[in-house]
Image (spheres, rainbow, N blue to C red):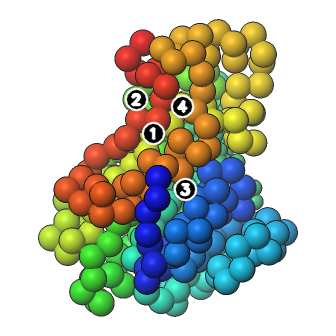
Amino acid sequence: MQLNFSGLRALVTGAGKGIGRDTVKALHASGARVVAVSRTNADLVSLSKECPGIEPMCVDLGDWEATEKTLGGVGPVDLLVNNAAVALMKPFLETTKEDFDRSFNVNLRAVFQVSQIVARGMISRGVPGSIVNVSSMVAHVTFPNLAVYSSTKGAMTILTKFMAMELGPYKIRVNSVNPTVVLTAMGQKVSADPEFSQKLKERHPLRKFAEVEDVVNSILFLLSDRSASTSGSGILVDAGYLAS
Ligand code: NDP
């Protein structure tokens, strides 16, 4: 998809690896200035070499104070991709307070915090904006050992609608993308058992998982004016899984 984001500044969280990293590359290639936020500095160093001119910011988004310190003065942002997440795999009965807190702090609380910082800036500048929350198909269906992770994504569904409702009057659109398994580091972890992985794939009407590029394309579409009348919504990138 050929989109032009020249003149716009984007912020992508979880930019070091996987979907976030390729989102940064696609936005950079489409003319945006990009703030790349992630936890491991080495990832940001290598990404900066691939995409000269991006602005790397290294922070643990699960730490509210550190995030405020790092991103509080981030300056004008027109496009935001809330992508960073952790997928802790545990059965419901074995999930600890620490698992719960870490998952919700990174996957949901940081979405609140970063979006507040960015949206306040958009409103004070009087400019329109677009925010994409990277969710998952497990916001809608169960998956083995992902009770707490899925809960963060389920909560993200209603948060996306609230943000769309409250920010819409300021011409800020908010949507989500909801992928099935994508074979990044995270996707390989949740589908590690080859037999389970094969059976899962066969349950998808398209008999495949999603590619990183498929997810990035949907993110870029929702960031762009091509989706100008879409807000509070979500795009399933699930190879038909929810229809199965
Ligand atoms: P990866 O684990 O491959 O990459 C996640 C990135 O986010 C890493 O760069 C990681 O940095 C960063 N990150 C994680 N925690 C933090 C934190 N506390 N602070 C700052 N950065 C952080 O994941 P994916 O690319 O696969 O996932 C991206 C998004 O897509 C997530 O929201 C995920 O829930 C969603 N998704 C993924 C699916 C999949 O199968 N892969 C399926 C459906 C949805 P570091 O490695 O340094 O911690």
Residue located beneath label 3 in the image: 83
Q: Which mark is residue 140?
A: 2
Q: CA distance from mark 4 to mark 3?
A: 15 Å
Comes first in the chain, label 4 or label 3: 3
Comes first in the chain, label 1 or label 2: 2
Comes first in the chain, label 2 or label 3: 3
Q: CA distance from mark 2 to mark 3?
A: 18 Å
Q: Amino acid at mark 2?
A: His
In the image shown, does 19 or 211 lie closer to the viewer? 211
Task: Tell me if 100 is positioned left or right of 78 in this view.
Answer: right
Comes first in the chain, label 1 or label 3: 3
Estimate the x, y position of residue 212 in percent, counting from the top left: 61, 43
Task: Tell me if 14 is positioned left or right of 156 in this view.
Answer: right
Residue located beneath label 4 in the image: 180
Estimate the x, y position of residue 138 in percent, counting from the top left: 48, 31
Q: Which mark is residue 178?
A: 1
Q: Amino acid at mark 3?
A: Asn
